Amino acid sequence: MKLNIAVLGGDGIGPEVLAQAVKCLLAVEENFGHQFTFTEGLIGAAAMDQTGNPLPDATIELCKSSDAILFGAIGTPKYDNDPNAKIRPEDGLLYLRKELDLFTNIRPVKVFPALINNSPIKRSVITGTDLVIYRELTSGIYFGEKSLSADGTVATDLCRYTEEEISRVAHMAFKAAKKRKGKLTLVDKAHVLETSRLWRRVVAEVAESYPEVELTNMYIDNAAILMTLKPTSFDVILADNMFGDILSAQCNVLIGSSGLLPSASVGTNYAMFEPIHGSYPQAKGKDIANPIAAILSAALLLNHFGLKEEFNAVVAAVHKSFRKKIVTMDIMGSTKYGTSSVGDFISKNIVDVDDNLNI
Ligand code: IPM
């Protein structure tokens, strides 16, 4: 298969973890006879420094003319600490999601058997955790009208959803639940928020087309508690933009590191693959950041194009790195391996397709 892939490293550790993902895709290309082309684009603080714009037109054009996008991370302390900033690095990512209409963000969370002792949560609680969060990504409070009063003492962020925005992501989540364990939990705050009540009505209507899926409604506060007490009770979670962001960040704790969880952001015409971690600026350039979330995001890219064997080969190589303890310092306190040596090990082991594991 021929694929043109846009590579948007962004800020902090983004470029160095994405370099490992690209290494792995090059190994897939070589071992499975594909033709991948990689083109780098600017986004975030890196783009602001060079062009004054966190999402230059050239980056949008690159993404639109590519088959898929790999994204690294966004944000730097330099821009974080300016309360009067009119534009921020994060806007680059948000505008890109909106511009490409990447309305569904898929975040799979599966506990890795070899890393079970890395989690601060008891082994008996997390064993068998296998869930996926479907997060609405292009609307809600992230994109509603914002305001700040002239004297700077009152601010608002509007949370707005339409039926159509809810139903399209809900269909994606129900389709996934149908193929998985047939359980879908809609997470909201329907006892307080009007938008949540709209979510409940629309999702209940969509559910009628999926009689084999059992729908449960759950308040976000209960979901946060259950995520720590009984994560195995979840299968597919459907949430709005904000709740999906927070709940998936909580999943980092379950699996014991912020460097492990990948995601796929998909719309009708475009798809972007992004680790769910941040830019971890303190680690930039130190070769200590965990590249697994970026590598697994590349695996999700392969899966998106139906390259199942290739997907399994990358995942199997990742599991092998855990078993052999070729891991960065956030895992098991190991200090022997850096970002690029973990990437080297995984890319060299990508031929190993026997394990047929899933993430
Ligand atoms: C994520 C990140 C982003 C988000 C930030 C960087 C804007 O936290 O992808 O989860 O909140 O969507």
Image (spheres, rainbow, N blue to C red):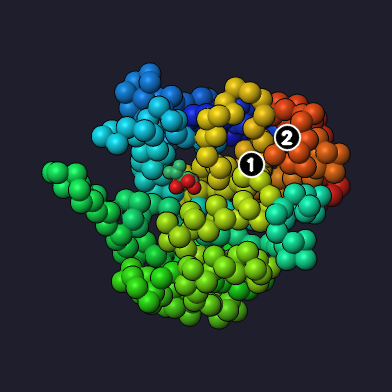
Q: Which residue is mark 1?
A: 259
Quadrant, the N terminus = top right
Depth check: give the residue in front, 303 or 325. 325
Secondary element at tag 2? loop
Numbered mark located on residue 203 in the image:
none
Tell me residue 141's x, y (percent): 33, 55
Q: Is label 2's Cβ within 8 Å of ligand 1? A: no
- Residue at 66%, 46% in the rendered image: 257
Tell me residue 337's x, y (percent): 77, 29
Q: Which residue is mark 2?
A: 328
Depth check: give the residue in front, 102 or 307. 102
- Residue at 66%, 35% in the rendered image: 291
Quarter occupied by residue 298: top right
Q: How many numbered discs?
A: 2
Secondary element at tag 1? loop
Q: Is residue 258 left or right of residue 352?
A: left
> Is disc 2 in contact with disc 1, using a CB cutoff of under 8 Å?
yes
The earlier-in-sequence mark between 2 and 1 is 1
Is residue 243 visible to the viewer in this orientation of the structure? Answer: yes
- Per the model, the C-alpha gap separating discs 2 and 1 is 9 Å
Three-letter code, disc 2: Thr
Tell me residue 242's x, y (percent): 42, 56
Three-letter code, disc 1: Gly
Is residue 100 visible to the viewer in this orientation of the structure? Answer: no
Q: Is residue 222 left or right of residue 34?
A: left
Depth check: give the residue in front, 181 or 190. 190
Tell me residue 177's x, y (percent): 60, 68
Query: How many residues crowd mark 2 within 10 Å: few (<14), some (14–19), many (20+)?
Result: many
Location of residue 345 with respect to 272 vertically, above or below: above
